[in-house]
Amino acid sequence: MSESNGRFDVETLRGVAGANAFARGEAYYRKNQVALLSVEPGRVLAHVAGTDDYRTELTGHGRQIDGTCTCPAYDRGTFCKHMVAVALAVNARGNQAEAAEESVLARIRRHLEAKDGSALVDIIIGLAERDAALLRKLEIAAAASDLDDKTAETRLRQMIDKAIGRSRDIDYYEMRDWGDGVAEALDAIAELVPAGRPELAFRLADRAVGKLEQALDRLDDSDGYCSALLQQARDIHLAAASLAPPEPLALARDLFARETGSVYGSFDGALVDYADVLGEVGLAEYRRLASEAWQNIPPRAGPVRRSLDVSGEHHALRSILDFFAERDGDADARIALRSKNLTSPWSYLELAQFCLAHGRADEALRRAEEGLWMFEDGGPDEGLLLFVVGLLTEAGRTADAEVRLWQAFDKAPSFALLAELRRLGGPAARDRALELLETNLHSQVAAKWYSRADFLVGVLIEEKLFDRAWAIARKHEVSIGTMDQLARQSEATHPNEALAVYALRIDQYAAAGGDPAYDHAARLVARMATLQDAAAQTEFVSDLKLRHARKRNLIKRLG
């Protein structure tokens, strides 16, 4: 059967792999370098002989193709040639490849099942003597299951330290192998929990967390290997503590120190997760520790220097005390917690939203308006302002809401504020806003992240008032991006103005040089052909080629 009619769509395969990887993978397949180990409905497993022997796994059907490979290219995020070769090999066997013949792994399984236990042990020992990774895995498993607690703890501590600790930094390309080794050690610790040795598992998981936190300083965790291992170690720690709860006061003090003091957040939310393990005695100690620490944090309101920004400890303590206040049903205490640090518009908004969610609309409005007043020198915070406007509108105070909006729009106009003004005031509000914007064009203060002229032209584009938009653009300095948008949106009504903008942009792209710039220029030349007659287009292109005759890659794109 043809490859194209097999399990994996060849054109999709070519697209995800790229031309070079596809061609090299096809060569591997043609040279019979693929050994299919297992072809199942859900996956394909194979070995591919290359610079080394690589384990390659594919999943999916048709255009849905995924998988993994042990080669360096896959580690760099590439759909590699080995995966291509395996897909083509499977396709050659047809859509029913999994039923075509017994797989290699199935034959091996049948062979091994016929042997007695001692023969299997001999086979595994022989493999372990030649495979360091397998030897390490078996050694960890043996230490966890066969040794007394003291000896097992010594051996497993050494293995944890060896797996995690290195004297040099670990780079990105080493992370997978490093992570696999650590995961094996953690798996062995996890097996201690159901095996009736939770106290040992607890101590070892605790050590693993500390070692992993130290390792984070000297490795590239871009793909989150270490973070995932930290979570795995913490899960073991919790599972072990749940089966054999430690002394509650000691546990509370240890978890509290970690939840409030860890740089890496390894025990974020520990109080919630360990609440049942802590029991009432441990919870009371947790609460006492948090309350004492909270008293040492001074209340603050209004803008602060960056050096006084809210610390991670503050967030952790507030979360802990909020847990207890919520459990007590004490909304006042929860509001007080959120009121202690009001050093940003967002903190006021969070507080106001909390009040509103708990049926305190009047207090929500008071807190939000206080936040606007506290931060008025830096310009109104849009989220906080719109929250206030919403509450005023719901209270029937539409006039007050409009006053707030116009004050903010005059100071820092934005599309969101304009939309709210139009919602409340209709077309008259739009006309007033346009008049205000034109009056304030001389202001040097930007409207959010753009000039006032850019903003006004943008509004006029939205309203399809292109005559006024072009008049502003001719008179005031407008950004390239806004001019491009205006030209594109008004081609039907102002083709000559659009042509002038495109011609200028084409020259800029040509001057910049490089294939991406030439591609942009060519697209604009093609667009110009839809806006002017053939003679004018021919004349423009001829002149462009003449002026840039030495830029061969540009000339090729112009045809």
Image (cartoon, rainbow, N blue to C red):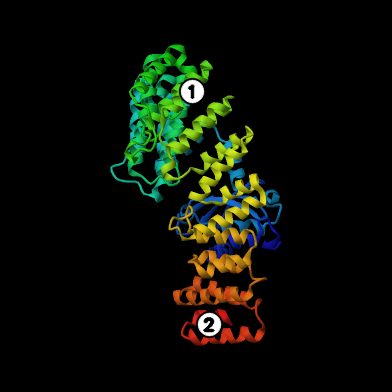
x and y percent of residue 380 in the render? 48, 43
* Mark 1, secondary structure of its residue: helix
Which quadrant of the view contains residue 200?
A: top left
Could you tell whether 363 is left or right of 90 in the image? left
Q: Is residue 38 visible?
A: no
Q: Residues within 10 Å of mark 1 (few under 14, many from 20)?
A: many
Under mark 1, the amino acid is Arg
Could you tell whether 285 is left or right of 84 in the image? left
Could you tell whether 170 is left or right of 529 in the image? left
The residue lying toward the viewer, choosing from 552 and 366, is 366
Which quadrant of the view contains residue 138?
A: top left
Q: Is residue 431 visible?
A: yes
Residue at position x 62%, y 50% from top? 429
x and y percent of residue 339 in the render? 44, 27
Q: Tell me, for residue 18, which label it has, or none.
A: none
The residue lying toward the viewer, choosing from 348 and 473, is 473
Q: Residues within 10 Å of mark 2 (few under 14, many from 20)?
A: some
In this rendering, is residue 485 above or below 44? below
In this rendering, is residue 277 above or below 428? above
Choose mark 1 or mark 2, whichever is in front. Answer: 1
Distance in Å between CA atoms under marks 1 and 2: 69 Å
Quarter of the image for the C terminus: give it.
Answer: bottom right
* Mark 2, secondary structure of its residue: helix
> Which residue is labeled 1 in the image?
334
The residue lying toward the viewer, choosing from 496 and 259, is 496
The answer to which of marks 1 and 2 sits earlier in the sequence is: 1
Residue at position x 64%, y 34% from top? 396
Residue at position x 68%, y 52% from top? 97
> Which residue is labeled 2 in the image?
555
x and y percent of residue 504 in the render? 51, 76
